[in-house]
Amino acid sequence: MYTRVQALVSAAAAALLLLTGCVAASDSRVAARSAEMLVEHGMEGLSTQQIVDALERVPVAERSTELMASVRPDRLVLSDAAREVELPMPAGLSYVSTAPYASRTHECWFHSLTTCRGELARVPVHVTITDDETGAVLVDEATTTLDNGFVGYWLPRGVEGTITIEHEGRSGSAVFSTADDDAATCITTLALA
């Protein structure tokens, strides 16, 4: 005897299977669109870290006007006119990019690999990054700012620290955090004095 309860259970099971099928088909379409987007923008087969490093180093004059790339502490968000892809950051790492400045800067929270520009492009700097809790020096190197005026580093998650940059006898410091998923990845408050 087929009871009303059995009918409801059967209907619920059928709805669940249909919904699961729709979600799986939807996920499949999203994955296909994501893969297509990565191919179109020359990023097929690259890790999130490789994509961030490559996009950060593209000369400003050669940057795509169609692609947006936003660095979040826990993911990279790529988008164009039709699609959006989110790629997870490497386990235990966040990317923080800093644009030291002498006279002008811009407000920024999540670093844009395609649109952010700092004042001091292609200049020699010395960068020191320390973990404020432990005093550990995470970075201590002489380098050159990129064509976009930034220097970026892969840093451990869960750190609160200080970035100090020196250029031509002037220096400045700014605090940073990789402790949560809303932390800034774009440091534009580092004034050289």
Image (cartoon, rainbow, N blue to C red):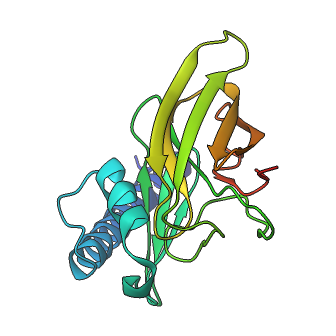
Tell which of 173 and 96 is nearer to you: 173
Tell which of 126 and 24 is nearer to you: 126
Residue 134: image location, x then y, percent: 67, 9
Q: Is residue 121 above or below residue 76?
A: below
Q: Is residue 59 above or below residue 91?
A: below
Where residue 46 sits, quadrant-wise, is bottom left
Instruction: Please state if 36 lies on the left or on the right of 176 as rendered.
Output: left
Instruction: Please state if 130 lies on the left or on the right of 44 as rendered.
Output: right
Instruction: Please state if 150 lies on the left or on the right of 44 as rendered.
Output: right
Which residue lies at the image location 67% right of the left edge and 36% below the top edge?
163
Residue positioned most to the left: 45
Residue 184: image location, x then y, percent: 70, 49
Would residue 176 be seen by someone viewing this image from the given angle?
A: yes
Residue 8: image location, x then y, percent: 52, 54
Residue positioned most to the front: 169
Which residue lies at the image location 24% right of the left edge and 82% below the top edge?
40
Would residue 180 be seen by someone viewing this image from the given angle?
A: no
Residue 81: image location, x then y, percent: 47, 90
Q: Is residue 149 above or below residue 94?
A: below
Q: How many marks?
A: 0
Which residue lies at the image location 29% right of the left edge and 53% below the top edge?
50
Which residue lies at the image location 44% right of the left edge and 89% below the top edge?
66
Tell which of 27 and 11 is nearer to you: 27
